[in-house]
Image: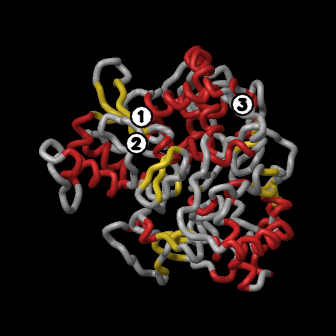
Amino acid sequence: MRIDDVGIRAGVALTWLLLAALAPTRAADAPDPAAVERGRRLMEGRQFLSAEWSDAAYKAVGRLWDEPGPDPDADPEGYARAFAGRYGFHPAPFPNDGLPMGLKRAEGADGTARGFQVDCLVCHGGSIGGKSYVGMPNTRIDYAGFFPDLFRADGRPLPLLPFVLNTTRGTTNAGMFSMALLSLRNPDLSRRVLPLPMGSNLPELDAPAWWLLKYKETMYHDGRTPAASARSIMQFLMADKTAEEFRELEPDFADIHAYIRSIEAPKYPFPIDRAAADRGRAVFEESCASCHGTHGDTVDYPNVVVPLDVIGTDPARVTGMSDRAVEYYNSTWFGEKHPADMTGERGYQAPPLVGIWASAPYLHNGSVPTLRLLLDSRSRPRRYLRPPSTDFEHYDTRDVGWKYVEAPEGESPDPKDPRRLFDASRYGLGIGGHAFGDKLEEAQRSDVIEYLKTL
């Protein structure tokens, strides 16, 4: 099955899932404010890739829906809301030329035709309670609906891809996009005609929150890549750029790296039982801090990679990455200064928990809808509907996370929006593991949850 540049460009923003576990050296090593500001402007205002779809396709796609959208010329705001709701985008909290966060205007590859393209905020721009945040995971995005519809509206077939885009709203398969992009480049980043076999089979995953990056020393879910590398967050540019263009753009991405390190988590907006939170802190520091760190005026984060046989969560993200792919990455410009580790522990990096209230669903694959279920592995649902929006009416303040509806086997509980369904039987989406909270009494579990609201 052929992978062509059009298909790769169509999904480049998904590579930011693999990039999103990017982690700066330490919170104490604060980025330069001037670099942060330059990075913010680049993130909000610049599209680094050529346009994939025409402006006409944006307006035409609403006619393909079962219930056609509002007229995009007579009611542009209503049409934009309908478009965003259907495909899981969120309003941009910055000027964005009428497009939702995650899309940005651009010129075509020939420098003339104007259109639009996805950018990194398609995965890493989310909302909660009606407010959008750069760096918040997008738990609503529906790639498997968006990409086919936009290509069809633009009069083109969707290029064939030999891997799953996503089966559930909010998951992304950026890892396989990264492998596909890399397979079409030589170590000097010149283009290849035929893709190299990478031997990897990575699953769809949950996008981590960018506000965690400042605390880490390594990046990605497996914690194998040094966070000092700005080059690693440029991988999605393999859809367009030459080796010389990569080198020219490296300073810009160093600034974007600094901006990502500066992002702060939103604070929990509801009342907190402070007595319960104090009790929960004691339980947390005894039971959880050795992996997740201590949280107070400062965060002391140990950067622990927990072995697979200890964490017990779905292994597909770790075992699906081949040594061949890591070795090839290290042989390229991306790994030249900061190669990925080939010798360390194989497992998942336990993240810091700042802003955890706003980053449900949980685990690396987004399989667990609430913190209470994260702390009680025996009660997790295998099939359930994710909420229809990120409004607070769907937020569970007791259990902390998203309200959900269990879905019996064999049923299609929402035929109009089938990708609301999460099904743990799919590759990489297992709900097991992280059973450490099972030993807690229910009162202790509630106290820990109350404490986590304060982070």
What kind of residue is marked 2?
Pro
What kind of residue is marked 3?
Ser
Left/right of residue 423 with respect to residue 78 in the rendered view: right
The x, y position of residue 332, in whole percent, is 70, 26
Foreground pick, 394 / 8: 394
**For residue 378, which quarter of the picture?**
bottom right
Residue at 68% of width from left, 79% of height from top? 446
Does the image show residue 199? Answer: no
Q: Quadrant of the C terminus?
A: bottom right
The x, y position of residue 123, in whole percent, is 50, 47
| Residue 159 badge | 2
2 and 1 marks in contact (CB < 8 Å)? yes
The x, y position of residue 159, in whole percent, is 40, 42
What kind of residue is marked 1?
Val
Does the image show residue 163? Answer: yes
Q: In terms of secondary structure, where does tag 3 sit?
A: loop
The x, y position of residue 63, in whole percent, is 18, 51
| Residue 229 badge | 3
Real-space CA distance between mark 2 and mark 1, rounded to the nearest whole angstrom: 7 Å
Q: Residue placed farthest to the left in the image?
A: 74
Position above or below: 256 against 110: below
Real-space CA distance between mark 3 and mark 1, rounded to the nearest whole angstrom: 27 Å
Left/right of residue 155 with respect to residue 236 in the rendered view: left
Q: What residue is shown with label 1? A: 6
Front position among marks 3 and 1: 3
Q: Residues within 10 Å of mark 1 (few under 14, many from 20)?
A: few
- Mark earlier in primary sequence (3, 1): 1
Front position among marks 3 and 2: 3
Residue at 72% of width from left, 75% of height from top? 275
Left/right of residue 285 with respect to residue 257 in the rendered view: right
Residue at 76% of width from left, 42% of height from top? 218
Q: In terms of secondary structure, where does tag 2 sit?
A: loop
